[in-house]
Image (spheres, grey):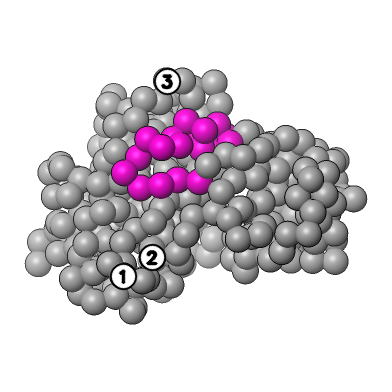
């Protein structure tokens, strides 16, 4: 029922076409015996994701995303009940048709922190930052060796070298303009990243959009989701997302995050380097969304986005 999809371009062509996707999702639900439950497509995301009934989520992956589907299912099973924040419970996963796979998981209660953030008081925002830091610390403390057959990279230093080699091409493709683009190589050359480090299980996209909150009562975090891009690597890699998407260039909030996590602040230059080397780095988006320094210097950008002074 679903066409074979082998490239991102082919996926983009059908990812918003509900005349193709919805009948397939309904057929898959019928095959699993989940007949008659309400099926509602979530608006955001690069993959088709549906709310099923009131307490389940169905996520579809094309054939070229097989590794991501298997990874997310394995990580969900590994994390279930192990973190201070709930994570989705894996209900089922398998191949569907034409190489497509699915993951059926429990749905976390509440709404995204990104959506709720403007409605929170300053004290509530402070508490959410602290709670999210404690959750990330617990994730980084989890045993990761049982996942090495599906979660990589196998060698962190080699991964960074490969990312560094393709940096200009990636940032040119995302539309980074001058003077920023030509300054990236020299900046990365000048920033030493750890040759060896204590590895951890990484979320890699730790952001308000992937945290949920109950807006009733105490307004507490209710969960963390989206483990499709999970990796094993330097914990600092996750802190790049923290500075960009959780504390968003607020030095006081970033200090609070480090304190609740239980560690000293990372070097801001290293975090910007990781942000530039990130698999899904989108510097033009960051430059639009976050404050800019008075001069277009990457070291100034690092201090502004990832510094804790001020």
Res. 47 in view = no
Give the mark nearer the N terminus: 3 vs 1.
3
Choose top left, top right, bottom left or bottom right for residue 52: bottom right
In the picture, measured across the screen, residue 305 lies left or right of residue 108, that is left
Q: Nearer the viewer, residue 94 or 279?
A: 94
Q: Nearer the viewer, mark 2 or mark 3?
A: 2
Residue 187 left/right relative to 176? left
What kind of element bears circle 1? loop
Q: CA distance from mark 1 to mark 2?
A: 8 Å
Looking at the image, residue 57 sits to the left or right of residue 24; the answer is: left
Label 1 crowd (10 A; few <14 / some 14-19 / many >=20):
few
- Name the mark on residue 214: 2
For the residues labelled 2 and 3, the Cα–Cα distance comes to 33 Å
Residue 89 in the image: above or below residue 3: above
Q: Pick whichever of labels 2 and 3 is earlier in the sequence.
A: 3
Q: Secondary structure under badge 3?
A: helix
Residue 38 magenta-highlighted: no
Rendered location of residue 222, percent (x, y): 39, 56
What residue is drawn where x is 70% and y is 49%? Answer: 60
Whether tag 1 and tag 2 are in contact, CB under 8 A, the answer is yes
Which one is nearer the viewer's eye here, 230 or 213? 213
Assign a secondary structure to mark 2.
loop
How far across and down, in percent of the image, does residue 129 sit?
25, 59
**308 vs 57, nearest the viewer:** 57
Determine which residue is flagged by label 1.
217
Q: Residue at x 59, y 65 (%)?
A: 44
Q: Residue 293's image quarter?
A: bottom left
Residue 245, percent from left and from top? 36, 61
Can you identify the residue that label 3 sits on?
145
| Residue 82 covered by magenta stretch | yes
Residue 51 visible, this orientation: yes
Magenta segment: 71-88
């Amino acid at each position: 029922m679903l066409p074979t999809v082998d490239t991102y371009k082919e996926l983009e062509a059908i990812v918003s076409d509900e005349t193709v996707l919805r009948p397939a999702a309904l057929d898959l639900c019928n095959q699993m015996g989940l007949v008659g439950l309400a099926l509602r497509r979530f608006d955001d995301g690069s993959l088709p994701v549906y709310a099923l009934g009131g307490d389940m989520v169905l996520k579809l992956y094309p054939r070229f995303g097989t590794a991501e589907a298997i990874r997310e299912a394995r990580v969900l099973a590994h994390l279930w009940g192990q973190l201070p924040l709930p994570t989705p419970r894996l209900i089922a996963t398998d191949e569907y048709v034409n190489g497509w796979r699915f993951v059926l998981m429990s749905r976390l209660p509440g709404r995204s922190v990104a959506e709720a953030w403007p409605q929170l008081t300053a004290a509530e925002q402070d508490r959410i930052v602290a709670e999210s830091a404690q959750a990330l610390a617990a994730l980084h403390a989890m045993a990761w060796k049982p996942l090495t057959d599906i979660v990589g990279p196998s060698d962190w230093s080699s991964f960074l070298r490969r990312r560094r080699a393709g940096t200009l091409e990636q940032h040119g493709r995302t539309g980074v303009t001058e003077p920023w683009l030509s300054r990236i190589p020299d900046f990365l050359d000048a920033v030493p990243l750890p040759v060896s480090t204590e590895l951890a299980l990484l979320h890699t996209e730790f952001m308000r959009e992937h945290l949920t909150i109950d807006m009733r009562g105490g307004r507490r975090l209710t969960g963390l989701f989206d483990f499709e891009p999970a990796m094993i690597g330097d914990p600092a890699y996750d802190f790049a997302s923290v500075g960009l998407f959780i504390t968003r260039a607020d030095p006081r909030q970033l200090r609070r995050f480090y304190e609740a996590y239980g560690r000293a602040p990372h070097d801001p230059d290293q975090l910007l380097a990781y942000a530039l080397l990130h698999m899904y780095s989108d510097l033009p988006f960051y430059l639009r969304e976050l404050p800019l320094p008075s001069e277009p210097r990457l070291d100034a950008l690092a201090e502004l986005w990832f510094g804790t002074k001020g």
